[in-house]
Image (cartoon, rainbow, N blue to C red):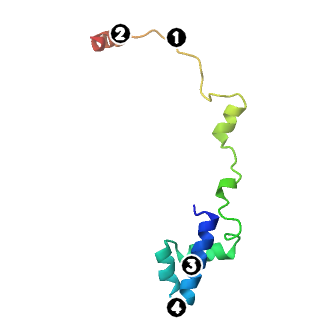
Amino acid sequence: MTRLEDRQILVRDIEQACADGARLAPACALAGIDVRTLRRWKVGDGLLQGDRRPDADRPIPSHARRRRRGLSRPWPTKVSTSPVSPAFIVCCAHMAR
C-alpha cells in the first residue's frame, strides 16, 4: 500500500517529469508504479482519500459464524467406546522402549 502523501508526491514528480519532456511510461517505471496505477489514482479519489482497503467492510466467513452461534465444532464430539486392539498396545509398548 502506498500512503496518501507518497501518492501525491509521486504524482507531482511524474507530472513534472512529463512537463519537462519525459514520457509517461518510463517516468512511472522509474517511480516504481505502473501507468495504470497512476491513472487509477487520478480518476478516482486516490489522491484525496488514499487506500481504502484497511477501512473496507469484511463480512464474517461462514465457518466463523458457526462458532459465534455456539456451535464450536461441526463434527460429533462423542469419543468412540470401542476397545483398543491388542496389536496397538504392543506397538505402543515397543515404541516406548
Left or right of 93: which side holds 68? right
Q: Answer with mark 3 or mark 2, whichever residue precedes in sequence.
A: 3
The label shown at residue 89 is 2
Q: Quadrant of residue 89?
A: top left
Q: CA distance from mark 3 to mark 2?
A: 74 Å
Query: Disc 2 on helix, strand or loop?
Result: helix
Of 81 and 48, the residue lying toward us: 48
Kindly indicate whether the residue at mark 3 contacts the one at mark 1 (C-beta within 8 angstroms).
no
Query: Disc 3 on helix, strand or loop?
Result: helix
Marks 4, 1: nearer the viewer:
4
Q: Amino acid at mark 2?
A: Ile
Q: CA distance from mark 4 to mark 3?
A: 13 Å
Q: Amino acid at mark 3?
A: Asp
Q: Answer with mark 1 or mark 3, whichever residue precedes in sequence.
A: 3
Q: Amino acid at mark 4?
A: Gly
Q: Amino acid at mark 1?
A: Thr
In the rendered image, the vertical position of residue 2 relative to residue 68, given as above or below: below
The label shown at residue 21 is 4
Name the residue tied to disc 3. Answer: 13
- Residue 61 percent location from the top left of the image: 65, 43
Q: Answer with mark 2 or mark 4, whichever residue precedes in sequence.
A: 4
In the rendered image, the vertical position of residue 78 relative to residue 12, given as above or below: above
Marks 1, 2: nearer the viewer:
2
- Residue 52 percent location from the top left of the image: 68, 60
Q: CA distance from mark 2 to mark 4?
A: 82 Å
Quadrant of the snapshot with the C terminus: top left
